[in-house]
Amino acid sequence: MGVPTVSVLFCLAALFCCLNCFNIDTKYAVLKESITPGGYFGYSVAQHLIEENTSPTFDTSYVRLLVGAPHAYSEDVILNEFNQTGALFSCPLDLKNPNSVDDCSELPYPSTQRFTNIKQMAEENKTEMWLGVNIRSSGAGQFVVACGHRYKIVQKGIPVQGEDVYVDDKGEKQVNVFGIGICYNYKADLSLEDIEEDQAKAPCAGLPLVDGDNSVAGEYGVCAAGAGLATQNPDVIYGIPSAKTFMGTVAWDHKIPFLEGSAFFAPLRPTVDAINPPSKLAAYRGYSTIIVRNLLNDLKKVAIVGAPSDEDKGAVVIFELDQTSKVLKERLKFMGDQFGSGFGLSVAVVDIRNDEHPSMVVGAPFYRSSSVSDANSRETISGAIYFYQNYNDGIRGDSSKVIITPGLCKAADTSMCVNAQFGYAVTGVGDVNGDGFHDIAVGAPFYGRGAVFLFNGRADGKLEDTPSQIIMAEDISETYTTRPISGFGISLSGGQDMDGQGYADILVGAHSSSHVVLLRSRPVINVQGAIKLNNTILSPKKDETECLSNPSSTKSCIDFTICFTASLALAGSSKSSGVRATIDYTVTGDSGYEYLGNRRVRFNVAGDASTSVYTDSTVVGVNGMEQCILMVAYITEVKDVLKAVEFEMEYTLAPPSRVQYEDIDTYPIMDVLSYSIPSAKVCQLFISAMLCFLGNRLTPACWAINSLSCQ
């Protein structure tokens, strides 16, 4: 009969509980605050680089956070003769002094416009023009456009003595105030265009302003041009949602030249009559728009145009510019599925697999969910987004819908979801976590004090059904603010690395409190842990001790090593040279066995039962090289030789004691979304998803890697 032995089996368990997952940092966010509240500073935002950064070290002096404040009182001499015109701001990114409240400067404005293609002389009225309702950058080192959709012109006819009206040369009363909207054009360095005629664009200025009944509504007298805006060098698309009795349209123009009347307009629907009353035709087409190439798998540029009131349910229309006929042709139309949901109020594209086959995301912020009820158990507005996947042959009519549900509310009574307006803003944000797939952000500005939901892209070209991270307004440090952040998520801009860390960052507007927040992405690292056994068969008898690591020991011991390999998740990144990670780990001996409070192994030869658990930390380089630590466990007197001795290891990243704003490289996060475990000869392993609670908020981004069975 053979000598009884203890079969020592090793099972690896790594537990990750990321309470603010995933890698969008809130502790070191960059915050900009308007000194004067009430101006809707942050109603629109845009990431911008004055120049393409080609130097080996990232130069943040090129970085600008562009901000629209459409209710602000401008301090510029061009605008201050008018009342509450709105204003445009450029904020630098100084990571040594990131949260200054007085370092944003107002952009310059063109001098008074004269639209020579209007038959009678016209003067402009910029009072309450909502300058800053939209601001867009066309890319690093490219032009910028910003709009005020309530800009008005006043036609000067023949004044009637003692009356504030004008008449034409026939003595008939003349409508003289037209809300046509205007957009201002800036070079990459944020100075105005050199040619005065190129400094401003009013797409409706050369069009009929009144219809046959002398009504401004029937033609282009209330265009509201610029309420929607998209740029992609050299193209600019202006949303004109109020034209033609609020049917709306868009104008597709080119940056050079900017000439009045050069834009190509989308075709309009039938004129108003008994069959087509204004209530039916009021689609507000052009409220949102974006330019994208290859959406329909034909390599052509198209305009995605939102019409949030189309047939009361909302719609999104895809237009193509026919280069031969110079007209916009309707290619596809997608309808909303709920009355009054605002389907199309926001639109975005995301190239999830980065393969030049973009998919489309549509926001419906007024969507009512039966799972979100108010105090009287009535369904209320919560919001939704619709995802239209590009299957490499273009997008199709089918979509997947994500709505606010109690599981996303972070509140047992779902009160935070009531009127959340999830989907008010949507944008592609690039690959924020370095997994090779592009992601999207969704704003819900009235989810509490506002929130941004981050959804990760997947290898199959779809979006995850649940967010990897929910960033609340109250998650942002308010150390440097004079008032609480609110309206957080009203506007979004993403896809650009703003701090040189190699990951895309997200710019968020919070108009109610007049803030903007730059959310920076922390480096994501893969950490592989392993336990390696050196000797596997030991005798538990006192007179047959064996301990290679300590020959004088009176007890048998087990030699093994624990190893860690850390590497950046961002493929092809050169940033790993300066990144180091501190790993906290706990090794439990005989984790699956405890008899009368005792386990059969100790990590100290003379230790008591408490020394069956060993806790320490180690620093590893994020360079893909394995680093190992020798462990020795001593066998106590063993009576149970039938049950295997198991070792379990838990590990996580230790937070640094202090991080400078410019050194977010030293504050990595472990990749919990795409974690993999190397094969092990002695254990079968599996990955199971878990949920972590932080107070009354549920975060669906914690993972456990456990032993399924040991043989």
Image: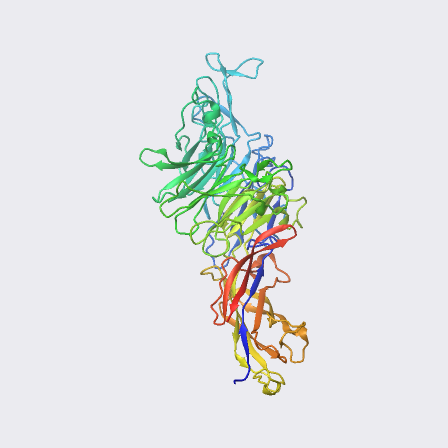
Q: Is residue 615 above or below residue 534?
A: above
| Image side of residue 602 versus residue 624, left or right | right
Front in this rendered view, residue 497 or 124: 497
Write down the quadrant of residue 330 in the picture.
Answer: top left
Relative height, residue 452 to residue 212 (above, below): below
Q: Name the residue located 67 percent from the left edge and 77 percent from the top edge.
A: 607
Furthest toward the top, the residue is 171
Q: Is residue 706 visible?
A: yes
Give whichever of 143, 707 is nearer the camera. Answer: 707
Q: Is residue 80 left or right of residue 500?
A: right
Residue 35, image x and y in percent?
A: 65, 42
The quadrant in which residue 670 appears is bottom right
Say if residue 189 shows up in the picture.
Answer: no
User: Looking at the rendering, which quadrant does residue 80 occupy?
Assistant: top right
Extreme-left residue of the structure: 324
Measuring 63% from the left and 80% from the top, which residue is drawn there? 637
Relative depth, front residue between 369 and 47: 369
Q: Which residue is outermost to the front?
A: 1
Asked if 448 appears above or below 169 in the picture, the reply is below
Query: Residue 24 placed where, x, y %?
Result: 56, 53
Q: Residue at x 39, y 49 (%)?
A: 356
- In this rendering, the count of numbered labels is 0
Where residue 145 sits in the image (x, y, percent)?
48, 39
**Where in the figure is residue 711, as x and y percent of width and height?**
50, 71
**Does residue 389 appear left or right of residue 516 in this picture?**
left
Q: Please name whichever residue, 338 or 320, is drawn nearer the observer in this view of the structure.
A: 338
- Indicate how the structure is coloured in the image: rainbow
